[in-house]
Image (tube, helix red, strand yellow):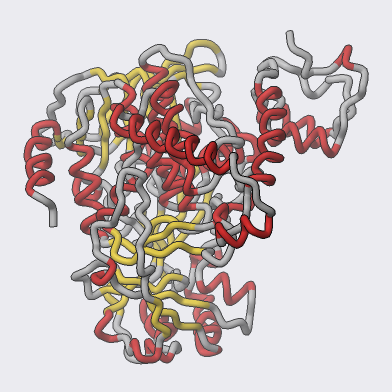
Amino acid sequence: MLTRKWWSSLRNGLSRVSRAPAGYRAIHRRYDVIVVGGGHAGTEAAAAAARVGAETLLVTQKIDTIGALSCNPSLGGVGKGQLVREVDALDGLCGRAGDRAGIHFSVLNRSKGPAVWGPRAQLDRQRYRDFIQAELLATPRLEVMEGSVEELLVEEERPGRHRVTGIRLAGHAPPLEASSVILTTGTFLSGFLFLGQTSSPGGRIGDPPSSSGLSRTLKETLGLQVGRLRTGTPPRILKDSVDLTLATLHPPDQHPTPFSFLNTHTHCKPEEQLPCYLVRTTPGVDRVVMESLDDNSHIQEDTKGPRYCPSIESRVLRFPGRSHQVWLEPEGMTSNLLYPQGLSMTMPPDMQLRLLRQIPALHRVEISTPGYGVQYDYVCPTQLCPSLQVKTTQGLFLAGQINGTTGYEEAAAQGLWAGVNAARSALAAPLLALSRTESYIGVLIDDLVTRGVTEPYRMFTSRAEFRTLLRPDNADLRLTLKGFEEVGCVSAQRYNEAVRVKEGLEEAFSTLGSLSRSPRDWRKTLETTVYRPHCELQKKEIQRIEREEGMYLSPDLDYLSLPVSLSNEVREILDRVRPTTVSSDLVGSALFLHPISHNTKHSPFSLQ
């Protein structure tokens, strides 16, 4: 339920909501920033752009689904929890929404060091959506419109170079002009739903399909390289039909850890939180999968699917005879639905029921909604700058699954950063990049724009070279001050709190520095690993990389004929990606494998 304050925000915000084209109206015909899509990437992008100071419009097909949890009812995890903390440190929405909607909080990897801890929460779907919608409708300089985007409006500045000018909605609505446009289309870009042998246009069950005009603009007008990916979701099952006595109970943490640095406790009290349950697949599950393959067109496709969150069909085919974990997760405080995490499937509904009932705890289970698969277009992210702007199109930014990622947290992180830079571009401020030495968001974006993807990208702590420093507990110290002083997306309230925490820690470190004890005594006193020596070594490496970040590579550099020792494969990659600095992870890998000549006369990395 919403509080009285949130209901007031919703009522007041209705004056800034319009539905197009029926009854079409807009307070403005021109905006600084237009965001297309109301998922995790779109909501963070719109809110961030408005915080930076841009007049922003969020366009979504259905206002009621803004902030909807399309797949699993959870947030965070190992690697993903770090992203949520960083989005929160930059004043984003998802961390506070998670604290409001969470009904089961836990920190994963507690047995390991703090650098790889993963804050995670099961969420109440309705509470999460209500919080996001109330926050957006109460955000100054942000309007929301319901409509389907038919076309991206661009102007050609010179051959191969364009500039975005706005969007055109379906249904003969007048065009809307903008200096910047952010596309956060999720799985809706030429999306198709698959269930057994049937398929239909769409990006999410129950929602209308997106128009084909947007895909056509990206491919034909802008000439962008577009690929195809697939994902899926499991069936939702009725809790009353599950024999939970045959499942292993997993309670939440006794002392729940909030996502947001602004919160000292979660909204749901520890004693009110709900448990999760663990079950495992059986040989009968494998048998049903093999029997259903001929009736499963989604699995027969060669489109790349997620390696890190695969369907049960893919898992059985890849690891025959193995028993797989399945987590039964609550969908809400008052919901009678359970989400079987690990059982994404696209076989016919009758076969889905047969498969579920091969698991002892589910032997009498009933399905509320069957699982299904989705295939959709994505734009190869090596065509983006570190600001998430398309290299060849001024003012066009992409965020979320359109860039080949998977997961709410990856989408939210990209959305926030795209929103920041789209606003800065519209307001004639320089675009910014986050370094992989200072944040997981920087690692995520650098991986995308330099390496690209061959399958849906998911964040892991192993992707961050400096994870000892990039811990979930210090994201505010790493990013909040920068977010206020340099980026402009952080409120004064959050900034002042971060300064207070920073000064308190500095005083504590000063006091500790005056004490002398043996490492053994320190370990006994602190009851945890002593990270400081490792952090100091990483700080030295970061300082070296920061010096290299100041060495820019010319965008016109001819890598194909450069007189240095590089393989043709590396030359082609560098020519296609065109990294901006020497510190790029891609450049580092290339030089490690193929060191350049010591003759610096012809070095491409000398400063001009």
Question: Between 482 and 2, which is closer to the camera in this rendering?
Answer: 482
Q: Is residue 80 left or right of residue 262?
A: right
Q: In this orientation, which residue lies closer to the viewer: 491 or 31?
A: 491
Q: Residue at x 45, y 62 (%)?
A: 107
The image shows residue 528 at horizontal and vertical percentages of: 58, 59
Tell me: residue 410, above or below residue 432: below
Q: Position of residue 183 (x, y in %)?
A: 39, 34
Which x, y percent locates residue 83? 47, 46
Can see residue 370?
Answer: no
- Which quarter of the image is occupied by the C terminus? top right
Residue at 48 percent across and 75 percent down: it is 295
* Residue 457, visible in the rendered structure: yes
**Quarter assignment of residue 515:** top right
Percent of width and height locating residue 257: 37, 57
Q: Tell me: residue 535, above or below residue 300.
A: above
- Residue 158, compared with residue 138, is above or below; it is above
Seen in the picture, residue 349 relative to 532 is either above or below; the reply is below
Which residue: 20% across, 27% down? 140
Looking at the image, which residue is at 49% across and 83% down? Answer: 280
Residue 290 vs residue 32, the one in the foreground: 32
